[in-house]
Image (cartoon, helix red, strand yellow):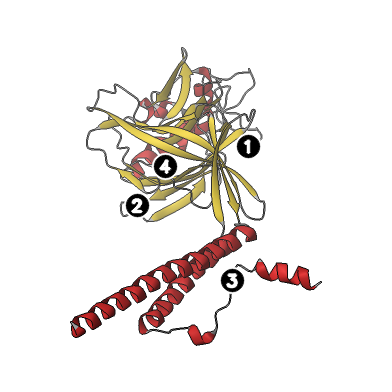
């Protein structure tokens, strides 16, 4: 047994020195104090890193299919009235959403940007004062109102009871309303008068669109849209104007839900029009993104980058449709962010490296100073005796 203990004693890598042989110096004390402070600061930094989460980023191929893309927007047009502003969306698969009204709120703004009225688009009662019936006569007390669609009805007995119904029927036919005052419903509801009354007003429009996850575009433009000969057209004749100011401020634009660290490059972007008509285009590259927090909760969202282009034209020379267009395309690469904690073993390894590294470097510096002082002292003593 004694032999085994002697062998273990011989393996001791930390031989002990009698305290009588220790020599304590002022420089050694200063180095010990400084190294202790450095060791504490490095340990505190490593502890803070251990307690906080780190985000790991990966790039993978996006193999998702058949999903939808949610576009959240909040845009202000300081010089375009709500009554003439419409929203359309379309994609390369051929799906169209023309004059979208659901999940969209419009707020009328005065010239100072104050809210006059907020309403969900497309909601409102029809004003009936002896309106014209489909058969040509005026509404009597014992009759049910069925307004004429002026030849645009899909079925023989279809009714258009409001100016909006007539315009919608015309849109489906691919027709434009050239003079609203010739439409009984529009004349009774004061369509042109409402447009004139809102002259000089602005509009804040916000909400969201749910579209297919394929390349496409959505846009804000004056007039009701329709397709004619395979071409997307907006009916601008009804407003009897030859210029439209589409100056705008994008308060918020996101493709999907918020996640920590996301940067939306179009938030708070503002553009002022300096020509009678203009078509402002944003070309957007959408990057699918998955964010997983430390609790395992996953957020499916998107990031995007953007470039801009504007087409201008003079009054009465509409070379392109006035409006704000957002053309988006999807990246085939998906980005994943995963929140993680540093493992305890990794933390322990780093702490040991800090303690051992600082202790070793301090020892080297102390030895260098100690032996340097001794050499200088010895030379000084030799100089005295010589």
User: Which residue corresponds to mark 1?
Assistant: 141
**Is 328 rendered above or below residue 384?**
above
Residue 318 at x, y percent in the picture: 29, 23
Camera-side mark, 2 or 1: 2
Q: Nearer the viewer, mark 3 or mark 1?
A: 3
Name the residue that disc number 3 marks.
14
Q: Earlier in the sequence, mark 4 or mark 3?
A: 3
Q: Residue at x 38, y 80 (%)?
A: 30
In the rendered view, would you say 6 is above or below 326? Answer: below
Q: Nearer the viewer, residue 229 or 73?
A: 73
Q: What is the quadrant of the C terminus in the image?
A: bottom left
Instruction: Report helix, strand or loop for mark 1.
Output: loop
Q: Position of residue 242 (x, y in %)?
A: 28, 29
Q: How many marks?
A: 4
Which quadrant holds residue 351? bottom right
Among numbered discs 2 and 4, the one appearing first in the sequence? 4
Q: Residue at x 51, y 87 (%)?
A: 20
Q: Residue at x 37, y 56 (%)?
A: 114
Q: Earlier in the sequence, mark 2 or mark 1?
A: 2
- The residue under label 2 is 110
Counting residues from the start of the chain, the first of labels 3 and 2 encountered is 3
The residue that mark 4 highlights is 82
Location of residue 50 by image quarter: bottom right
Cβ atoms under marks 3 and 1 closer than 8 Å: no
Q: Residue at x 64, y 28 (%)?
A: 65
Q: Say which quadrant the N terminus sits in.
A: bottom right
Give me the C-alpha separation between circle 2 and circle 1: 40 Å
Q: Which mark is residue 377?
A: none
* Apparent side of residue 184 relative to residue 159 in the rendered image (left or right): left
Name the residue at the front extreme.
Answer: 386
Residue 54, x across and y down, in percent: 55, 54
Q: Nearer the viewer, residue 173 or 196?
A: 173
């Amino acid at each position: 047994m004694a032999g085994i203990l002697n062998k273990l004693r011989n393996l001791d890598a930390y031989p002990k020195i009698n305290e009588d042989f220790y020599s304590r110096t002022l420089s050694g004390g200063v180095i010990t104090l400084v190294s202790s402070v450095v060791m504490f600061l490095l340990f505190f930094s490593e502890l803070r890193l251990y307690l906080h989460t780190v985000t790991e980023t990966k790039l993978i191929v996006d193999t998702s299919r058949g999903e939808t893309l949610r576009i959240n927007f909040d845009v202000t047009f300081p010089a375009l009235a709500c009554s003439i502003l419409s929203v359309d969306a379309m994609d390369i698969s051929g799906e169209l959403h023309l004059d979208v009204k659901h999940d969209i709120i419009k707020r009328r703004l005065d010239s100072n940007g104050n809210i006059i009225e907020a309403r969900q688009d497309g909601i409102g009662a029809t004003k009936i004062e002896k309106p014209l019936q489909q058969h040509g006569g005026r509404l009597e007390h014992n009759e049910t109102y069925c307004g004429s669609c002026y030849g645009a009805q899909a079925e023989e007995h279809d009714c258009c009871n409001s100016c909006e119904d007539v315009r919608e029927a015309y849109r489906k036919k691919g027709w434009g309303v050239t003079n609203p005052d010739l439409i009984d419903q529009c004349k009774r509801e004061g369509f042109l008068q409402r447009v004139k009354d809102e002259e000089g007003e602005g509009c804040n429009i916000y909400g969201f669109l749910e579209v297919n996850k394929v390349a496409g575009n959505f846009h804000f433009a004056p007039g009701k849209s329709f397709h004619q000969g395979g071409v997307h057209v907006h009916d601008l004749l009804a407003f009897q104007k030859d210029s439209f100011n589409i100056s705008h401020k994008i308060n918020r634009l996101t493709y999907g839900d918020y996640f920590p660290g996301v940067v939306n490059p179009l938030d708070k972007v503002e553009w002022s029009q300096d020509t009678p008509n203009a078509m402002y285009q944003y070309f957007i590259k959408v990057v699918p993104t998955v964010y997983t927090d430390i609790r395992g909760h996953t957020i499916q969202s998107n990031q995007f980058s953007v470039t801009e282009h504007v087409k201008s034209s003079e009054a009465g020379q509409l070379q392109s449709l006035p409006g704000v267009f957002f053309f988006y395309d999807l990246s085939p690469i998906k980005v994943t962010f995963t929140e993680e904690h540093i493992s305890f073993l990794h933390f322990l390894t780093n702490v040991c490296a800090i303690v051992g590294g600082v202790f070793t470097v301090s020892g080297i510096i102390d030895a260098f100073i100690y032996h340097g002082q001794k050499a200088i002292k010895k030379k000084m003593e030799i100089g005295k005796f010589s």
